[in-house]
Amino acid sequence: MELTKKVFGRFENQDVYEYTLTNKNGVSISATPFGATLTKLVTPDKEGKRENITLNVENLEDFASNRPFYGATIGRVAGRITKGKFTLDGKDYQVDVNEGENMLHGGPNGLDTKLWDIVVDESAGRLVFTYESPAGENNFPGTMQIRVTYTLTEENDWVIDYEATTDEATLFNPTNHVYFNLTGDIKKPILDHELELASLKYVPLAEENLPSEEKASVEGTPFDFQTAKPVKEAVLSDHEQIKPLNGLDHPFVLDQGKEVKGTLYDPESGREVTFYTDCNSVVVFTHNGEVDDYTIEGEPARQYAGITLETQTLPDAINKKGFGNIVLRPGETFQSRTTYHFGTRD
Ligand code: G6D
């Protein structure tokens, strides 16, 4: 495993670096301690051409000022918390809201906005990010010790391990907001990517993109990815859950009986990502509008420039019966693992 590092930008009057691990097959991950963020993911296509297959902004300043979440560690709680309210152990909480009346992605000062510490273990192909989130940050209770470990294996896996503890009962539901574009060219949309998901149910969205209380069957709907199909068959459909959003932004309930939780495949490049997770859901968002607050390779981030596979406990779980447990208590250690495996096929 080869390690390189270079200055990615400056934050709070200090240089912030980008660290790159490259394995023997030419697969590499790059990441920065700002937001414990994946900044590049380079894999060979079926002809052996190595290209970055994720959406990223090119400099820290753009990233910090626009907060596009690309590749960032999201938390304390990924997704939305309705009105920023929840009750825990009989006490009512109001966390900081940052999308209308709701909290999105951990609030205005979420984990993606923080400068984490980093320890590099080159021989193990490991970047270990740590951050102490003080009690009251975004108005969440409890001081948390959080560790996120990125491991690149010689078998072409990007393994994300989350670990966390708290000194007071709190909430924790992290994810990584990586957007894949397996063509290697972010000017090409992901509409022809073929998606397969081990999922029989999805959560329809209510007002303000908040999750509904329902887990609806995918059968006979554009949300049925039990057999691989081009993403555009859903994204471009007239389905009442998709048309208003111009695409997907939905949680899928993952089949806990299946080891492989899903695959994403690009017929043009032959690249394939297979993912595994201990989470009960994956949020698939298809970058449904062009974003021109910043440029990538001199271009605005186009509509459908990437697709996320945000593994997590179902969004707003603290307020939704049967969505899972995101409460973390003193004496407990939160642990979760998601693995993305990279390969090619003709
Ligand atoms: C939009 O609704 C979507 C979110 O799911 C996504 O994470 C964010 O954009 C980047 O708010």
Image (spheres, rainbow, N blue to C red):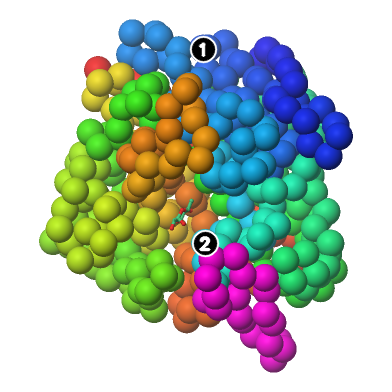
100 in the magenta segment: yes
- Residue that label 2 marks: 79
The quadrant holding residue 243 is bottom left
Report x, y in % for residue 342: 44, 27
- Label 1 sits on what residue type? Asn
Q: From the top left corner, tell me how far across and down residue 285 is, in percent.
A: 39, 50
What secondary structure is marked by label 2? loop
Q: Amino acid at mark 2?
A: Gly
- Binning the other alpha carbons within 10 Å of mark 1 as few (below 14), some (14 to 19) or many (20 upward) gives few
Q: Which mark is residue 25?
A: 1
**Left or right: where 335 falls relative to 308:** right
Cβ of mark 2 under 8 A from ligand 1: yes
| Residue at 54% in and 75% down | 101
Residue 284 visible at all = yes
* Side (left or right) of 216 relative to 79: left
Q: Horizontal placement of 127 versus 54: left or right?
A: right
Please report the residue visible at 78 percent of the width from the left and 31 percent of the height from the top.
Answer: 10
